[in-house]
Image: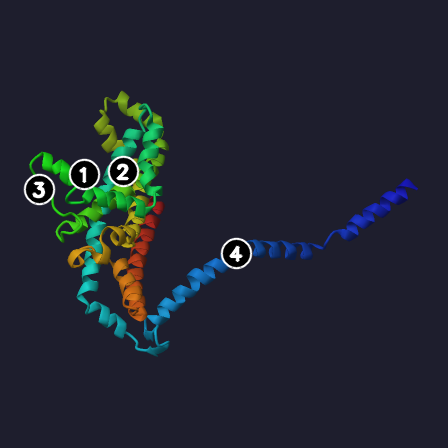
Amino acid sequence: MAVAVQTDRSAARGASRPPRRRLGYERRRAAWLMLAPSLIHLIWWIGIPVVATFVLAFTDYDVLAGTIRWVGLDNFREIFADEVWNLSIWHTVVFTFFTVPVAMVIAVVIAVLLNQGIRGRKWYRAAYFMPHITATVAIALVWMWMFEPNIGLFNALLGRVGVNGPAWLSDPDWAMTSVIVVSVWKGIGLKMLIYLAALQSIPREVYEAASIDGATGLRKFWSITLPLLRPATFFVFVVSMIDAFQVFDQVYVLTPNGGPANSTTVMTFEIYQTAFGEFRISTACAQSLVLFAFLFVLTVISRRMTGKDDNAR
């Protein structure tokens, strides 16, 4: 009797189990259901706008009248004949040229110092990383006070040594410099953190062997630390280049309207002005494609260089 009951229960459990195909189908359905929110967000907020940008760049779209007309490459001819747009490209290149290497050098030095056994190094690391996670608007407001020509901190310090400080954000000769200083200061934290992680992965035995051979601290830095930081340096360089080409927040808050005489107008700010200030959506889409082309070229170059470096290793 007991054997019969056990057999019936086993048969019931076997009957309740879904076939292998049904089990695979249910797992796939569950996976798609879990991926659905991210896929919907990706398609709706990224995929469709990207496709729309590529299409509208070759049209004349009047957002107020709701009309659209195919114009081919006319928008691209228009933007490259625009002095302000060409100036914004130059400003973006200048901004990138000065912010990326300067911030990287400072980040390496700070990372090396914070990798030593100094007291309170965790607090120093947090302090240096804090600007990266702080809202850009809040940071810009503090720097606006420091750049203020009459009561600002910088001009007050310069006045103590008998130097008349400039109107930092209102002077065309100093506005871009001011934005670069803020951007360098804000970007050090993340770069420092990446370098610090790379430094902690270097075996201590390498430094100990160098010490036995009589290498000084500076010699260790040039012959051991920098070569072994090459992968991290390359990663930081590529990411920083892409980030610098997309700078917007600092320019928008520190120097409204692109600064005096368009002295701080960069590509992203000019795209914003064209789209939402002048409502020339098609022209802004063409400008966005030019910016995309810059970023695409940078990405391709970085991937090729990374591939060669990986093959060499």
From the top left corner, tell me how far across and down residue 108 is, in percent: 27, 36
Circles 2 and 3, Cβ within 8 Å, touching? The answer is no
In the rendered image of this protein, does residue 69 appear above or below residue 191? Answer: below
The residue wearing badge 2 is 107
Name which residue type carries label 1.
Leu
Secondary structure under tag 1 reads helix
- The tag earlier along the polypeptide, 2 or 3, is 2
Query: Disc number at residue 37?
Result: 4
Q: Residue at x 32, y 58 (%)?
A: 296
For disc 1, the marked residue is 153
Q: What residue type is labelled 4?
A: Pro
Q: Looking at the image, can residue 117 be seen? A: yes
Front in this rendered view, residue 47 or 69: 69
Residue 286 image point, x, y percent: 29, 67
Front: mark 1 or 2: 1
> CB under 8 Å between callouts 3 and 4?
no
Question: How far apart are the alpha carbons under marks 2 and 4?
Answer: 38 Å
Q: Please state the horizontal and vertical placement of residue 93, each as a whole percent of the image.
A: 21, 54
Q: Distance between the residues labelled 3 and 4?
A: 57 Å
Question: Residue 293 in the image: x percent, y percent?
Answer: 30, 61
What is the secondary structure assignment of the residue under circle 3?
Answer: loop
Q: Label 2, label 3: how many angstroms apart (C-alpha)?
A: 31 Å
Which numbered mark, 2 or 4, is in the foreground of this view? Answer: 4
Residue receiving disc 3: 164
Mark 2 crowd level (few <14, some 14–19, many ≥20, 10 Å Cα): many
Q: Which of marks 3 and 1 is nearer the N terminus?
A: 1
Q: Is residue 83 left or right of residue 18?
A: left
Residue at 15% across / 59% down in the picture?
261
- Compare marks 3 and 4 and give the one earlier in the sequence: 4
Residue 172 is left or right of residue 223, and the answer is left
Q: Residue extending furthest front?
A: 151
Q: Are marks 1 and 2 in contact (CB under 8 Å)?
A: no
